[in-house]
Amino acid sequence: MMRFFAVFSLLALSSCASFFQGSQEKAELHMRIGNSYFAQGNYPLALKELLEAEKLDPKNALVQNNLGLVYFTRERLDLAEKHLRQATRLQENYSEARVNLSRVLIEAKKYKEAEDELNKALSDLTYAGFDRAWFNMGLLRFHQKNWAAAKSAFEKSLQGNRDNCLTNSYYGRSLFELGDYRRAAENLDKAVGFCQKQMFDEPHYYSAVAWYRLDEKDKSVARFQEIVKNYPEGKYREKARAMLDLIRKGVQ
């Protein structure tokens, strides 16, 4: 689930509001500490600090949003949804929270609700994160197996962020599902360059399969071998080994 944080919005490191007095000021301090722990990957301590911030300032929409993100990383979709919905209730025009909420709803397979939240965010002309909104829309369509609509949404996302690992990977996978294997292979190869440093082997694997479908075995074998060599803990490592065995045996 953490993979989606490549585009699933990161916690804000500071509030756009000025420092408050009393309990609100203390809440802001706890939120900043919690955000710092989150950035370090220490989710239990991040949660502890953000819960303290919530006690001190329960009507702070940013605290609610950040709690939702932490619960998402902890795979508590119920609590993530609860806090993100609260963030949007506290601040109606909080489009970032709506995009985050849509991601949780997609994971929970609540597709209609996710689409509603995304449409609200995309109708906000002041919202700067349209690339994240369009990525989530593409992910929604991908989950619904509407490959053409997914491809279109990912293209719109790439207009705002051309170097994103997951967007490039899912764009290539959408082309793959549409049977456009050459464009899929080329775009997945591009995604490999963005995803290697994150140790995300999915575009590597689908690139290899696309080249295999195109009967370009040398390119396919090279990609499968790279997975085995470079991703010792990779999700697709054993599948890559199996494909290499099939290719060596001449199985079509």
Image (spheres, grey):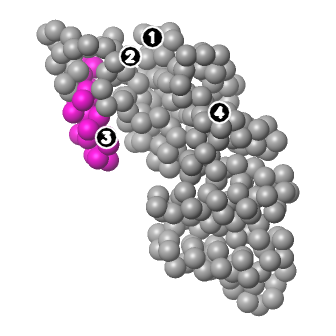
* Mark number displayed over residue 38: 3
Give the crowd class for mark 3: few <14, some 14-19, many >=20 residues within 10 Å.
Answer: many
| Number of other residues with Cα within 10 Å of mark 1, as a class: few under 14, some 14 to 19, many 20 or more | some
Q: Quadrant of residue 121?
A: top right
Instruction: Identify residue type, mark 3.
Output: Phe
Q: Amino acid at mark 1?
A: Gln
Q: Nearer the viewer, residue 49 or 15?
A: 15
The secondary element bearing badge 4 is classed as: helix
SS at mark 1?
loop
* In the foreground, 55 or 215: 215
Residue assigned mark 2: 61
Question: Which residue range is magenta in the image?
Answer: 31-55
Task: Of the two numbered discs 3 and 4 on the same chain, state the one appearing first in sequence.
Answer: 3
26 w.r.t. 35: above or below: above
Question: Quick one: SS at disc 3?
Answer: helix
The circle drawn on residue 91 is 1
Q: Where does the image place residue 137, in percent across and percent down from the top left?
A: 67, 33
Q: Does the CB distance between marks 2 and 1 fall below 8 Å? A: yes
Q: Residues within 10 Å of mark 2 (few under 14, many from 20)?
A: many
Q: Is residue 179 left or right of residue 204?
A: right
- Residue 12's x, y, as percent? 36, 30
Q: How far is disc 1 from disc 4 in space, using C-alphas?
A: 22 Å
Nearer the N terminus, badge 4 or badge 2? 2
